[in-house]
Amino acid sequence: MGIKVVLIDGYIDDPAALGVPPYISPIARAVAGAAIDAGGDVEYITIDMIRKGLKIPDAKVSVVISGNTVPGKYIRSMPMSLKEIENLLPSLKGWKLIGGSAATADVAKRFDFAIRKDLAASLYDGMTGKEVGERYRDLDEWNRWMILGADIVKQHHDFPYPLVAEIESYRGCHRYASGGCSYCIEPLKGKPLMRSPKDILEEARKLRELGVRNIRIGGQTCIISYGSKDDSGTPRPNPDAVSELFHGLKGLGFKTIHVDNANPAVISRYPDESEIILKTLVDCCTPGNVLALGMESADINVIRANNLNSTPEQVLDAIRMINRIGGHRGDNGMPCLLPGLNIIAGLDGESKATYDMNMEFLQRLIDEGLIVRRINIRQVLPIRKAFDTKVDPNRFKKYKQSIRESVDHVMLQRMVPKGTVLKDVFMEIHDGNITFGRQIGSYPLLIGIPYKLECGKSYDIIITDWGYRSVTGLTYPFDINHESMGAIASLPSIGKKRSATIVRYRPYTSYDDLSRAIDDKKVIEGLKGLLSFE
């Protein structure tokens, strides 16, 4: 038996790592691998297991991972709160470490070590008798630890499905020499340290052998720049490296393969190479895939003051190209590849006019008939530096709401028109009589079904309506002869009274036959394409 190490996953939600269920972050697996490499025997526990009453076992080393620098709206779970960390402390035994963005909080001072850079590297050093400092793992350690730590996926409560394992491709930013974007810590990690396709595929193969069905290639600042040896801030892409990696992943038999960020300036400057790479992503990845583009601001003053990636014209170039190459519908019902857009408020140089410029840019997308999968609007967090701009909370709230109502709603209508069938929607929670589910992957569309379905099970869903950030749908095919009265009442223009009549006169053989219960041609017409008559 080795040194007992308890690893508590409080979930990471950072620009470079997703770890909130159904995700398991690469950070957790690296920490486990480092502990095993140092002679440890690891027990992996999630905060949800603790929330359900699991007792924390005795250990020589207790490690906590937690932090969300880009908090979102969570469905089934959420990152561990600082209060939960404080409550856990008396139960942690032995030598105590904390990593993730929670390591900067006051509660972290009560741990033996609060690690801000690389928790896996610091843990390994401490367990092998070296001084515990702040450093990053080298490439050999990185690849070795990801293989050694892979087995903890089997201890995750979402294993084997719907668990998504994020796999890192590289560390750092090609814009490191200029300091990169003012708010981002990735350029501070220096020149990109690339993992080879061979090493990434070895990790992916190990995860697949263990039973993982869904992965996301993440952690990088720009997947289009993967494998590039160009040291300029806007590197010439390497289509061959991307092709080797993703065709290799495709051959491993995963159900879901998605990706993370892309730099729109790279796509705009190198359209020929970028087009080849985008076609590779369409060919090898699962539909519903999202390339998150960091525009941050359409205000040139903000762009200059914060050394941002791209101009609005470059972002528009990238969105057009991604729509052209990936906008067609895939076999699961979603477009194959769509752009996402990040907008940040509170950056240096921002003025009242900045919000108007951002809205004008978004209106251009609408006017050109383009689609963006999701627009992430957040206030800047002072992780790297303090910002002088004060964000008016009321103005920011109205601005955000305006985008949701006038832009997001239009994008949802374009992305999944009424009658679109989305396959394998995994049901997650009930809210009253509504069941909410999502397809598995990055930024999956939230779908509300206005009646109860079994959670933990997947269904095909036909879209009937749109909100601002979610859509409404029905199980497909909707068997009018066997569905419950409550489910039938949720059909367009039906309601309780008509549903009772429909049930009374069942069975039906066609839409014409259904007119025995519904004497309204307009209502019948609105149901066409939704129903099954078995």
Image: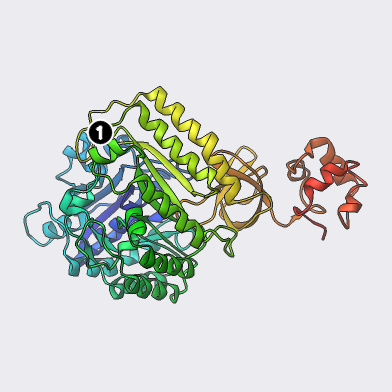
Residue 59 rendering spot, x and y as whole percentages? 22, 54
Q: Give the number of callouts.
A: 1
Residue 247 rendering spot, x and y as whole percentages? 41, 75
Look at the image and tell me in which quarter the C terminus lies: bottom right
- Classify 10 Å Cα crowding around label 1: few (below 14), some (14-19), many (20 and above): many
How is the model colour-coded? rainbow
Residue 441 rendering spot, x and y as whole percentages? 47, 57
Image quadrant assignment for residue 104: top left
Going by the numbered disc 1, the residue's amino acid type is Asp
**Residue 87 visible at all:** no
Foreground pick, 134 / 335: 335
Q: Residue furthest right?
A: 516
Which residue is painted at 22% across and 48% down in the image?
180
Which residue is painted at 30% across and 52% down in the image?
16
**Residue 421 visible at all:** yes
Q: Secondary structure at mark 1?
A: loop
Q: Is residue 530 left or right of residue 144?
A: right
Look at the image and tell me in which quarter the N terminus lies: bottom left
- Disc 1: which residue: 348
Q: Is residue 448 left or right of residue 206?
A: right
Residue 254 rendering spot, x and y as whole percentages? 46, 69
Which residue is painted at 46% across and 40% down in the image?
362
Which residue is painted at 31% across and 59% down in the image?
26
Position of residue 350 relative to residue 43, above or below, is: above
Foreground pick, 472 / 427: 472
